[in-house]
Image (spheres, rainbow, N blue to C red):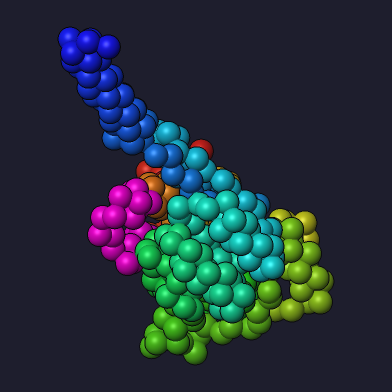
Amino acid sequence: MTFHDKRKFSKQLVCSTFATVGLILLTYFLLNLHPWTKRQYTVGTSYMTMNNNFYVILNEQIANSVNQHGDRLITRDPALKVDKQVQQINDFIKEKVDLIVIAPVDGNSVKIHQALRKARAAGIKIINVDTEMKWADANCTIATDNYRAGSLVARYLLKKEKQAKILLLTQASAYSAKERISGFCATLSNSSKTKNYKIVDRLETFGQSEIALPKVTAYLKKGKSFDTVMALNDQAAIGALSAIAAQKLDKKIHVYSVDGSPNMKLLISKNSNAVATAAQSPVKMGKSSAKAIYGLLKGEKVKEKIVIPTEIIDRGNLNHYGTTGWQ
């Protein structure tokens, strides 16, 4: 090979090397830096039950945002079972999700707490929605002021009725439910007219219509005396209203609750026993959750607690809210 040929070969080798390096850099740019090929995030959601339209609507807001970002959403239903929700959290860890949104079946569950600690140790962000937890496992908690919701109902009752014999419909495992009932009872106790308002009993309903209906039916058949129901949520209230209607009583039993669901609002418009509900907004909660999700995923500072406001819905302001959807 002549000197001229060697020089020509060297130039070709240099050009080939630069072309290869350039191709590698271009490929890296397209795969890692270009917005069209951004990393896809995975979000897992597990609410205490999907047999509640509140969580369906909340999850829809999150799903809309996740889809718009081109990311992936995995939704699971623990059906009010702690062990099932724990397994779902462990499955999310195996799936290597980036963030979990959870409404715990039981906010005091050590099993759920330990599973969430394991998720945090794996680098997964946690958003706790609707009902709070005993332990600070979440990066962010988004919930209605449940204590205030119960208090609002009690204040409404104090203005509307001079006295009441009250049956409480509860859900012992849900922190949000306990806060609502606590707010209701404390407000009555602190009233100057507290002697006129008596809690006659409590029934555990798990916040489900199909459980509340037979329990209230049995309670009515026993001849127990009460004229007011305070339910932890609209679903339990609707079960109570069905039980009351089936008995064809010659007296009114006024029913109050928390949620502001379309079904409860419709009953308030038509059923004289359905009086009022302290409204939540799964739409606002879902949109706030979606915003917090992408704030956390981008490494931005997100508030540790976000409170969604609540207010009373009754016949007087029902037209403002409507009966065909959530507020």
Residue 7 is situated, as x and y percent measured from the top left of the image, at 18, 15
Q: Quadrant of residue 21?
A: top left
**Above/below status of 35 relative to 160:** above
Magenta span includes 297: yes
Q: Residue at x 44, y 83 (%)?
A: 186
Residue 282 is situated, as x and y percent measured from the top left of the image, at 45, 50
Residue 67 is situated, as x and y percent measured from the top left of the image, at 45, 35
Number of numbered discs on residues: 0
Q: Which quadrant of the rendered structure holds the N terminus?
A: top left
Asked if one can make out residue 206 in the rendered structure from this viewpoint, the answer is: no
Q: Residue at x 68, y 74 (%)?
A: 204
Magenta span includes 266: no
Asked if one can make out residue 196 in the rendered structure from this viewpoint, the answer is: yes
Q: Compare residues 309 and 262 and report the one nearer the observer.
A: 309
**Is 83 situated left or right of 144 in this image?**
right
Please provide the residue range marked out in magenta. Answer: 291-310
Q: Compare residues 229 and 13 and report the one nearer the observer.
A: 13
**Above/below status of 24 relative to 253:** above
**Is 180 situated left or right of 201 in this image?**
left
Residue 245 is situated, as x and y percent measured from the top left of the image, at 72, 56
Q: Quadrant of residue 308?
A: bottom left
Q: Residue at x 45, y 72 (%)?
A: 137
**Above/below status of 11 relative to 149:** above
Q: Residue at x 33, y 55 (%)?
A: 296
Q: Compare residues 72 and 214 and report the one nearer the observer.
A: 72
